[in-house]
Amino acid sequence: MLRTLMLACVGAAVLGGCAATQQAAAPFDPATCYQRDFNIYFAGRSTELTDDAQRVIDGMGEAVRGCYIREVRVIGETDEAGNAVTNDEISERRAQVIAEYLASRVGWPRSRMVVAAAGERGAVTEEGLNVPVRRRARIIVEAQASE
């Protein structure tokens, strides 16, 4: 939005001026303050946030803007590929990367975050079947209207 506005202003400046203004933020709606549970997916064995993952996280941050963030649980996971120690390290790093992003970019208090690493635990069912799409971190946000 801001990039579009800036481009519009640059174009308008060439033609003689920019009268565009930013839109005001939507008013706070306490009904948006409830528990949210969502996943962020990673490519292969990566621990890097993709642009799409950042957009999802930013969108969730926007969805609960103005809410009191009581607690955020970030649980890193992996599939069963590799060894257990490496999988624990990867899942821990995934959870840490998301917690860092939530604190620095979304503005949620790091002191209210619980970071955990599940590694490959749960990647295979009791019947021996692989659980698909385990290259992720699960984020559970406890949001409420006021402290």
Image: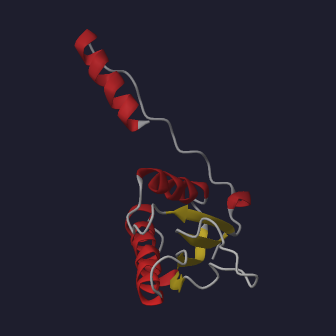
Which residue lies most toward the left here?
Answer: 14
Residue 84 in the image: state x and y as whole percent.
48, 88
1 vs 31: above or below: above
Work out whether residue 94 or residue 56 is closer to the camera in this orientation and state it.
94
65 vs 2: above or below: below
Which residue lies most toward the bottom here?
Answer: 85
Residue 19 in the image: state x and y as whole percent.
37, 21
Work out whether residue 42 or residue 37 is closer to the camera in this orientation and state it.
42
130 vs 56: above or below: below
Indicate the quadrant where residue 69 lies: bottom right
Task: Identify the residue at horizontal 52%, vertical 68% (top origin).
Answer: 135
Whether residue 71 sits left or right of residue 10 in the image: it is right
State the quadrant of the C terminus: bottom right
Residue 34 in the image: state x and y as whole percent.
71, 67
Which residue lies most toward the top here?
Answer: 15
85 vs 110: above or below: below
Task: Identify the residue at horizontal 55%, vertical 54% (top origin).
Answer: 62
Indicate the quadrant where residue 68 lies: bottom right
Work out whether residue 31 or residue 95 is closer to the camera in this orientation and state it.
95
State the quadrant of the N terminus: top left
How is the rendered protein coloured?
secondary structure
Task: Identify the residue at horizontal 62%, vertical 71% (top origin).
Answer: 141
